Structure formats: structure tokens, C-alpha cells
Amino acid sequence: MTISSQQTHDEEMQKPSRPRGEIKLPEQAMSLDPFPWYRSMRESQPVYFDTENQFWHVFKYEDASSILNDPATFSSEVFQRLATEEEKKQATAEPSILNLDPPRHRQLRSLVTQAFTPRTVANLTPRISEIVNEYLDRVIDQGRMDIIADLAYPLPVIVIAELLGIPTQDRDLFKHWSDTIVSLRREEAIQAGREMNEYLKQVTEQRRKAPRDDLISKLLAAEVEGQKLSEGELLSFYGLLLVAGNETTTNLIGNAIICFDEHPEAIERLRAQPDLLSGAIEEVLRYRSPVQRLVRVTTTDTTLGGHKIKAGQLVSPWLGSANRDEAQFPNPDTFDISRAPNRHLAFGHGIHFCVGAPLSRLEARVALGSMLARFGEIKRDRAHPLERIPAASAFFGVQKLPITFSAR
């Protein structure tokens, strides 16, 4: 599919659509450099109807932000509203808070937020630092490592698995399930979801009988307006943590190293001024957003960017494009670790702002800070071309990231 010009008038936008098993997107959107395509779309067709996939693409910051801040019009309940009865029967869990609208979203989010209070996240710092340095110890004498396999992948898996109370020997299972669920292989993703849920049902039943000091036990004991969470709600929350939490943090750390490799002056500034690291991470989130796009469904006829959008149509705000919008960010294609303000949309906005954002930021800050402290010159090994993860253009990162370094 190519996107060149508006192919049909708004009045010809056909019947409401439902999700398809696979979405075909332009090659530019699936590449490691989609940003020139984003720019051309912002300039020529900032709100565009994709006739092949039957949904709207939205590229500008103002439009994307308005979608995220209007859940009454742009619903997150895509599956519930558009799936067939057969698709609903095949579902492996109930929708997570990512895919719920108020009031149920508000009720469940209040519970989830309790599990990720600033104090709870901050208290994880020593353990995260311990994990990071344990993995750096393994490679420090080699002078080379794969950022993804040797650090960015295992770190969030271990942290979230420990929060849930998952045994150490089963962590690789969750990484396998996580990778498969966000892949383009629909049947395999469904099967992985079933396998993960069966495993988590067993762990949950064990915690019912013998509670421990872990997140699963706390969620079992929690109540929302006097009611316990259902098994389906528990499973959807576990899945959200294990999939979204792992993928986002892994990509954030990997994308940061790519940015630093492309802009070595940034590393020098960070070595001289370590307090700039938090701002540098925010710039990575803007410049190479770990999640490039979201999906919503309209609940009523509406207008966006001068286009009439019918009720029941899919709308996809491209966060990766919004975060490079010239109208919001001066010199948007410049990587500036001291950029301020930096109101990027990498973690979403509004009621669905990522609950796990503080944990992801902390993991990235500890990992990158430890690397800068322990490694000298860091260079990407260009003998191995970068290959983007295959995740239907939603997740944005690389499968492998070999680097060389000197020990400090």
C-alpha cells in the first residue's frame, strides 16, 4: 500500500469497520526511520483515511492529543465494540485497563495505581541497581555486549516477575510469551496468550491458598467498590504488566543507546553532567518513542482536522509523528537532551497515561547511569545491521544491539 493523496471524499467513508487479523502498512511505517514519512504526512495529509485497512491515520500533535484527551468520543474499547461474537469467544482474557473506558477504567486504574505509588517504585531502586550491575559484571571483561539480550531484555522481565512473585526459572517463559503476543503472528499470539493465562491461573490459585508478599496476593485481597477482581480482570492486569511493561522498557533502553551512538556529544555531556540523564531519557522517549501508535474507535460521528469521521471507525494517532511535530517541538529532528519543555506523548496522555511510566523511567535511568559510570567509550558494532522488531509498527525498537566499550 502507498499513501499519496486523499483517495475518497469524507461522504464516501463506508460502513463502520471491525479489527482485521493483520494490518498492512507502508514500508516506511515499518522501517527504523519512519520519520521522513511522518513529516510528509503531517504536511500533506495529517488526517488520512486508509481505504485498505479501513481506519484513519492521525499525524499531528494537536490532533493526537485531542484524541487521547477525549475518551468519550475516541473509545479505547476497540475489541468490545468491533469484534465479532466468535472473536469474543476466542478471547483469552478480559480487556485490560488499556482497553476500558470510564467508569470501569477509573475503578480499576485506582487499584493499579495503588500498586505503583511513587514510594513503591522508588523502593525498587536498590534491587534494580543490583540486577543491572549483576548483568554488567558478566560482560565488563569482554569489552562487548548485546544491549538487548544482555541487559535491556532481562531487566524488566526480572523486575516485573519478582513483583508478581513468578519463580526465577520461569522468567524465560514470560519473555517468550511476551514476544509472541506482540508479534505479527496472530494464531501464535493467541496460543501464547492462552498458555500464559493457564500458567497464571495456577499461580493465582496457589496464592489464594497461601498468600505471599507479592503483587498477585495483594490484587487477590484488593477490592474495587466492595467487589473483588474477577479472574479475567486479574489475568488481564498480569498480561498488561508482563507484555507492555517488558516491551516498553526494553525498547526505551535500546533506543537510548542508539540515540547516544548517533549523537556522541550527548554522552560527553552526560558524563560531565550526570543530572541531565532524566532529561535525556525524556528526549529519547520523544525522539524514538518505544510505542509509535495507538488505536481508538469513535463512539459517535465527529470531525477531526476538517474531516468527518463516522461512528464505529478506527482511528490511529501516531505518537512517533506527534513527537516530531514542528508545531509543538522546535527543531524536532534535533536530539537535545536539555530540551525544555518536552511534553511528548510517548506514554500517552489523559486518563490512559501509562501507569508503569515511573517504573520504566527508573529502570532506564539506573541501567543507563550504571553503563555511563562503568563503561568508557561506547560504540555500536556496525558489522551487525539494526533490525526492527516485528510488531505491526506499534512497538519501536531493535531485535539486537551489539556494542563495544572500554571499562572505566
Image: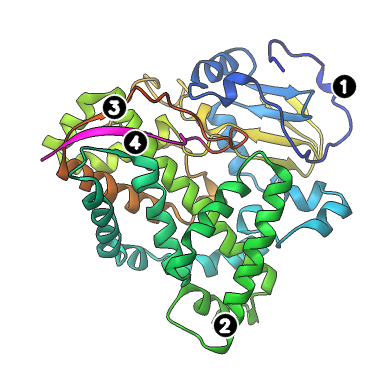
Element type at mark 4: helix
| Residue 315 drawn at (x, y percent) | 70, 35
| Lower sequence index among marks 4 and 3 | 4
| Residue 113 drawn at (x, y percent) | 48, 65
* Badge 2 vs badge 1, beta-carbon distance below 8 Å: no
| Lower sequence index among marks 2 and 1 | 1
Q: Amino acid at mark 4?
A: Ala
Identity of the residue drawn at 48% across and 28% down: 387
| Lower sequence index among marks 1 and 4 | 1
Mark 2 nearby-residue class (10 Å; few <14, some 14–19, many ≥20): few
Element type at mark 1: helix
The residue carrying mark 3 is: 261
The image's colour scheme reads rainbow
Query: Which mark's residue is nearer the viewer, 3 or 1?
Result: 3
Q: Between marks 4 and 3, how big is the CA–CA gap?
A: 9 Å
| Lower sequence index among marks 3 and 1 | 1
Q: Nearer the viewer, residue 185 or 61?
A: 185
Q: Between marks 2 and 4, how big is the CA–CA gap?
A: 39 Å
Q: Amino acid at mark 2?
A: Gln
Whether residue 21 is situated above or below residue 42 in the rendered picture: below
